[in-house]
Amino acid sequence: MLGGFLSVLAELDNDALVQAVRARAMPACGEDVRILPAELAEHRLLIGAAESVFAEVLANPAPAA
């Protein structure tokens, strides 16, 4: 599963990407490899940016005193 800016790689030429991964993987691990773009589509970068803004709040939701 590729997300964020890496999902563009799968969209450009997924077959070539899969072949490159298989060529560099151990044979048993590369046989059934599938590479899929994340399903957030055009919203993937916006959602990632929003998550980074709220990362501190998510890590420590207690209000500051």
Image (cartoon, rainbow, N blue to C red):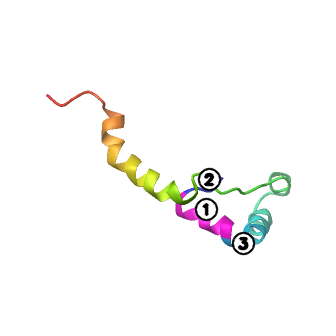
Q: Decide which of 43, 6 is in the foreground and name it.
A: 43
Q: Secondary structure at mark 3?
A: helix
> Could you tell me the amino acid type at mark 1?
Ser
Q: Earlier in the sequence, mark 2 or mark 3?
A: 3
Locate residue 16 relative to residue 9 in the image: left or right: right
Q: Secondary structure at mark 2?
A: loop
Q: Is residue 61 above or below residue 7?
A: above
Q: Earlier in the sequence, mark 1 or mark 2?
A: 1
Magenta region? 4-11
Q: Position of residue 61 (x, y in %)?
A: 30, 30
Q: Is residue 30 above or below residue 15?
A: above
> Could you tell me the amino acid type at mark 3?
Asp
Q: Are marks 1 and 2 in contact (CB under 8 Å)?
A: yes
Locate residue 7 relative to residue 58 in the image: left or right: right
Look at mark 1 in the image and give the residue it sits on. Answer: 7
Specify few, some or many for label 3: CA neighbours under 10 Å numbering under 14, 14-19, or 20 or more: few
Look at mark 3 in the image and give the residue it sits on. Answer: 13
Question: Which of the numbered marks, if any, corresponds to residue 38?
Answer: 2
Q: CA distance from mark 1 to mark 3?
A: 11 Å
**Residue at left 75%, top 69%?**
20
Q: Position of residue 49 (x, y in %)?
A: 40, 54
Q: Earlier in the sequence, mark 1 or mark 3?
A: 1
Question: Which of the numbered marks, if any, corresponds to residue 65?
Answer: none
**Residue at left 62%, top 56%?**
2
